[in-house]
């Protein structure tokens, strides 16, 4: 009897344990099903909106896709060696060269946001840059509406639609930096409004702005023009799509050849409102200044190679009694070719031809790019040599307040690797690492 009772008790205990385990298993499966359902729901919501990563980068968006915000940025870190002749007897006020200078520099660190608001056709961008001193400056801040018929309007602060080289962002240049000629003739960032039209084989830009290089200036600034207009047209001779011309590089996998020919003109007047005439070389006010700037250029992209050429011009009238108008010209020719899927060789010649007795300035650049990920600018390593064939003090000598020397146009600017020297040649070796996200 005792043995039978023991067996019954043991069987009951076993059944109790089995039932408990079964119940727990059912609960676990129900919980797993709940988790899977929740995950599917979250995935569905992410596909319709929310946050994540897509082909355009990191984003936050609404379920209908009309409101989006993308975060983007880049960084360029350089190591530069500069070689120039020392001057034992410099001209009055002009600093003498140091012979050899080298070091690291965070040349450019950018961060920005872009996206759409209210409607996918209404887009915006706000982007700023930390310069090599760590100071933050606003570059772009604009809104844009694009109609289905190819017309668009942009308003705010944006890159001036004048030079093709200027319109291609820093991260997508062929060399570590744009040409020095572009620095002389480019319009930088401007404030105003721009109308655009894009068709299959041509596109046009027309702007009404505050004038050349007027970023981050109040409306009554003396640096602004009374008024300024610019127009640029580009004709696509061959190739499919405009996006391939957003950089100077052409991958080996390109389906076809592409060629665009462009021309642009900019005209501005100043001096009639709010002290907008500027000052002359002696610091005296100028009653007005009229500037006509123009260019014609061509950009060719083949299957693994590219060529770009531009002619640049500037005509300036200073309203100073007895002063003549000044005409300055420039030119750029550059080319690149891939020798492997990740290694690209490039070269460039650019020149500035000033008016009067000033010497012409010629610069040569040779280099190589290595794309860590093929067909991507996300991580790019660049090594290049830049040579100035004439003295560079007239352009690059730093200001010397003690000697009342105002400095050259690029006095204190280091991004080209050239610092200003009294004799030729001056050579810069630049090693650059770039990341884009």
Image (tube, rainbow, N blue to C red):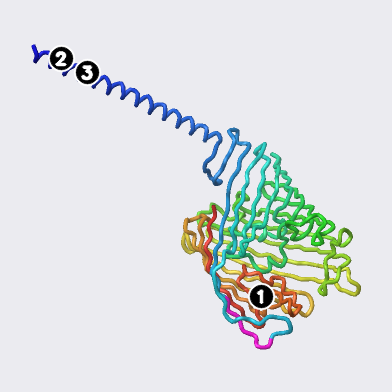
Residue on which the image places disc 3: 15
User: Which residue ends up furthest to the front in the rendered image?
Assistant: 2
Q: Is residue 158 above or below residue 351?
A: above
- Other residues around mark 3 within 10 Å, as few (<14) / some (14–19) / many (≥20): few
Which quarter of the figure has residue 219? bottom right
Which comes sooner in the sequence, label 2 or label 3? 2
- Other residues around mark 2 within 10 Å, as few (<14) / some (14–19) / many (≥20): few
**Label 1 residue SS:** strand
Q: Is residue 187 left or right of residue 308?
A: right
Give how far apart the Cα atoms at labels 2 and 1 are.
105 Å
Which comes sooner in the sequence, label 3 or label 1? 3
Q: Is residue 22 above or below residue 294?
A: above
Q: Is residue 310 left or right of residue 314?
A: left
- Which residues make up the magenta segment? 82-89
- Which residue is drawn at the image coordinates 87% and 74% (left, top)? 323
Q: Tell us which disc is closer to us: 3 or 1.
A: 3
Residue on which the image places disc 1: 362
Residue on which the image places disc 2: 8
Residue 154 image offset from top left, x and y in percent: 72, 47
Q: Is residue 124 left or right of residue 195?
A: left
Which comes sooner in the sequence, label 2 or label 1? 2
Give how far apart the Cα atoms at labels 3 and 1 are.
95 Å
The answer to whether one can see residue 331 in this image is yes
- Other residues around mark 1 within 10 Å, as few (<14) / some (14–19) / many (≥20): many
């Amino acid at each position: 009897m005792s043995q039978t009772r023991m067996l019954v008790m043991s069987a009951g205990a076993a059944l109790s344990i089995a039932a408990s385990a079964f119940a727990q298993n059912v609960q676990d499966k129900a919980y797993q099903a709940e988790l899977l359902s929740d995950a599917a729901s979250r995935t569905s919501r992410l596909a319709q909106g929310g946050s994540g990563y897509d082909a355009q980068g990191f984003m936050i968006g609404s379920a209908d896709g009309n409101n989006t915000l993308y975060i983007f940025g880049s960084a360029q870190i350089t190591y530069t060696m500069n070689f120039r002749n020392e001057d034992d007897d410099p001209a009055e006020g002009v600093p003498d060269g140091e012979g050899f200078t080298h070091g690291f520099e965070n040349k450019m660190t950018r961060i920005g946001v872009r996206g759409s608001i209210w409607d996918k056709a209404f887009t915006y961008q706000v982007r700023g840059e930390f310069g090599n001193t760590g100071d933050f400056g606003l570059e772009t801040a604009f809104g844009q509406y694009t109609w289905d018929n190819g017309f668009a309007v942009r308003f705010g602060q944006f890159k001036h639609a004048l030079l093709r080289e200027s319109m291609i962002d820093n991260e997508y240049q062929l060399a570590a930096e744009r040409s020095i000629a572009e620095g002389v003739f480019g319009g930088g960032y401007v404030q105003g409004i721009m109308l655009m039209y894009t068709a299959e084989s041509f596109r046009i830009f027309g702007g009404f702005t505050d004038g050349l290089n007027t970023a981050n200036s109040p409306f009554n600034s003396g640096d602004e023009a009374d008024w300024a207009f610019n127009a640029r047209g580009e004709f696509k001779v061959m190739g499919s799509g405009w996006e391939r011309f957003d950089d100077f590089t052409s991958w080996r996998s390109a389906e076809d050849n592409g060629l665009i020919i462009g021309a642009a003109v900019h005209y501005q007047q100043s001096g009639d409102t709010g002290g907008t005439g500027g000052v002359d070389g002696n610091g005296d006010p100028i009653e007005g200044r009229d500037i006509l700037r123009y260019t014609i250029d061509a950009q060719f992209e083949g299957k693994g190679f590219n060529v770009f050429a531009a002619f640049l011009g500037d005509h300036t009238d200073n309203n100073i009694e007895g002063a003549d108008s000044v005409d300055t010209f420039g030119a750029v020719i550059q080319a690149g070719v891939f020798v492997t899927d990740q290694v690209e060789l490039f070269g460039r010649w650019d020149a500035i031809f000033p008016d009067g007795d000033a010497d012409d300035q010629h610069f040569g650049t040779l280099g190589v790019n290595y794309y860590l990920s093929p067909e991507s600018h996300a991580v790019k390593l660049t090594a290049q040599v830049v040579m100035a064939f004439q003295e560079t003090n007239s352009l690059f000598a730093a200001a010397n307040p003690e000697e009342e020397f105002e400095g050259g146009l690029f006095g204190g600017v280091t991004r080209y690797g050239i610092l200003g020297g009294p004799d030729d040649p001056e050579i810069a070796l630049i090693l650059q690492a770039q990341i884009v996200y």
